[in-house]
Amino acid sequence: MPDLATADLLDLLTSADPHERDEVAYTELAGRITSGGEDGSLLVIGDRLVGYFEDGRVYARSFAALVLAEVVTRDAMIGALDPAAVHRWLAAFSDWYLEEQDLRGFDDDLGWLHAVAHGADAIGAFARHRLLRRGELGGLLRLARDRVLSSGSALFAAHEDDRVALAMALVLARPEVGGDESVRWLNALEGAFASGEPGPVPPWVSNTVHTLRALYVLVHEGGHVPGEPSRSFSVPDRDLVTGAIARTLRELFPFIG
């Protein structure tokens, strides 16, 4: 395959062909960004990706989030971008992520769509950026929480819950997120669970429970930073957070503890 210009790869990122979109465009862009080959173009790439959040095709929106995670991760390492750009991208991403309605993981014709998982990866990338402070990090926790709570009838079946849990754990690993800030976001979950009625368990409840269970394990055991298997992370307020998660889950499963 001949070398493609960055602009061409960004075009292919919106292709309905899953091979062109995933195997060619995403793989090549991620490699170039991670290696530093696009360090001079991060602003242009990020702005182009953010524009895709308004695209009418879910795969364009979703893969924009996935590549944006690479851009934000790279800038967290080199600090090349104006802070205003990072905050502008965060705002645009947050608006899209919470409002996205197409939560399919995989489509037989279109391949991976995975808006929830790709968005979670972007949250994890923003969580590791030094420019985000306590209030914005708390906002990332609430964004991830609300995305799962608003999953409606879409049952996570392709590790979306694990990816969201990892993103939340990366936020909680930041030392700025401690004390009440590390557990206050759970209050809305307790209220949502308490309002449940007898009958079949709604998919959003299952999604939320599975996410919390995965998060409990990550907080208790620690984890590894995506893309950096030799770099581990831990949550400073581990006991506080795991205790709060257990209390929240006890609302649905009273046999805990």
Image: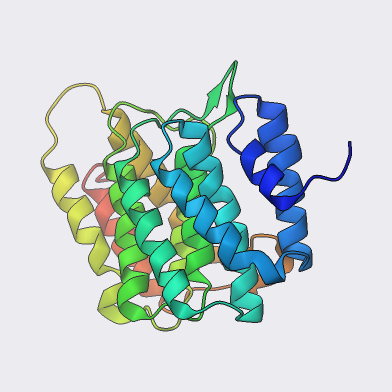
**Residue 153 appears in the picture as rendered:** yes
Residue at 18% across, 55% down: 188
Q: Is residue 54 shown left or right of residue 194? A: right
Residue at 64% across, 60% down: 226
Q: Quadrant of residue 8?
A: top right
Q: Position of residue 202 (x, y in %)?
A: 26, 28
Total marks in image = 0
Q: Quadrant of the N terminus?
A: top right
| Residue nearest the observer in this picture, 31 or 45 | 45
| Residue nearest the observer in this picture, 215 or 91 | 91
Is residue 153 positioned above or below 147 on the image?
above
Is residue 69 positioned above or below 62 on the image?
below
Residue at 60% across, 58% down: 45
Q: Quadrant of residue 10?
A: top right
Q: Position of residue 135 (x, y in %)?
A: 30, 76
Indicate the colouring scheme. rainbow
**Residue 160 appears in the picture as rendered:** no
Residue at 76% across, 68% down: 36
Outermost residue to the top? 109
Is residue 249 positioned above or below 219 on the image?
above
